[in-house]
Amino acid sequence: MTIAGVDVASFQGTFADWKSAAGAYEWAAVKLTELGPGSSEYIDPDAAADWSGLKAAGKGRVAYLFAHPSVSASGTVTYFAAELAKLGLEDGDGIALDLETTDGASPAAVAAWGLSVLTQLRSRYDRMPLLYTFIDFAQEGCCAGLGGYPLWIADPSSPAGSPTVPAPWKTWAVHQYDISGDIDRDVANYGSLTEMKAALGKQTPPPTALRLLEDPMNIAPGSTDVIMALPDGTAKIKIGYPIATPAASVKVEFPDGTGSTVAPYWGKAVKVESGTNNQVRISVLTATADISVVASE
C-alpha cells in the first residue's frame, strides 16, 4: 500500500493555486531554501502559504532544501533551519535533502557533503531526513554511504510504486513517478499517513529513527559525529577503512562519557558495549572509515 503525495515549489504558486490540480493526495513536500554558490540565497516565496495551507487541510508535510555541495554543509543547514523556524515544525512533519547536483565536485566529495548535511539535520530535528535524488546521480557514486537514510527516488520512467532502487539502497521510501504536468506526483511507501509520520516525524528518546545501519557509511575526517542506536546487550560495530588509505583513528563513546579511541582494521569487528539509551557516538579523527553495525549478540 502506498500514499499519494505531491511536491511543490514556486513554480506551482501558493497552496490556493495548486490544491485543486493536486487531486487526491495525503501529503506534500514543500521546497524552503536553496543556498547556492557565490553567496546566492533563495527562499521559496510560496513556502509559508504552502506550509500553513497543508496544515489547515490536514495533510502530511515534508520540508526540503535544495543542495549545493560547493557551499558549506553547516551553512546550508543553518539557512534552512532559520526559515523552518519561521514556519514551524510539528512532530509529524518530515524533512528532506534534495541532492541532485555536483557543483563540479567529485562523487566522493558530494557524498561526504550529503552525509554531513543529513547527519546535522537528523541531530537537529530528532528525525530521519529523506534523501531525494535520481538514479544516474546515485549510480555515479554521489550517494555512496547514504544508504542508511530513507530514499526519495526520482524515477518517472517506472510505474508509481515500482521504482528502480539504486545502490547503496535496498528499498525506497518515496517515489516521484510523474514530472510531466503542472505538479510533480509521488507515492510514499507506507501503509498510512500515520505510519509515514511515525517513520519520518520526530522520534521520542531514544530516537528509534537512528536505526542500525544496513550499509556502511563512508565518513570523512572532521565530519559531524554519527550517532547510531544499538540493540540491548553487546553489539559488534564493524570499523574499517578502504584499502590503500591510511588507518583511520575512530573515537567511540557513549552518552555517559565513557568510550575509547580505536584503530580499526579492514573487516575487523570491534565489540563495544551498548551505552546509555543504547546509543553510540562515533567520531572519525583521521583518514576515512566505513562504519556499520553488523551483528548483535
Image (tube, grey):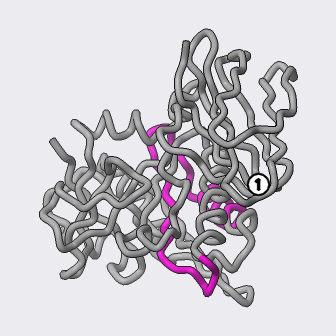
Decide: is 160 above or below 205: below
Instruction: Provide the secondary structure element on which disc 1 rests.
Output: loop
Magenta region, residue range: 77-106
Left or right: where 235 falls relative to 58: right
Decide: is 80 above or below 260: below
Question: 166 or 248, which lies in front?
Answer: 248
Q: Which residue is mark 1?
A: 223
Q: Position of residue 125 (x, y in %)?
A: 61, 44
Looking at this view, name the residue that lies furthest to the front: 244
Question: 140 or 245, which lies in front?
Answer: 245
Q: Position of residue 96 (x, y in %)?
A: 49, 57
How many numbered tags mark residues here? 1
Looking at this view, name the residue that lies furthest to the bottom: 38
**Neighbour class for label 1 at 10 Å: few (<14), some, many (≥20)?**
some
As for residue 151 lying within the magenta part, the answer is no
Q: Quadrant of residue 5?
A: bottom left
Question: 121 or 49, which lies in front?
Answer: 121
**Residue ID at (66%, 71%):** 109
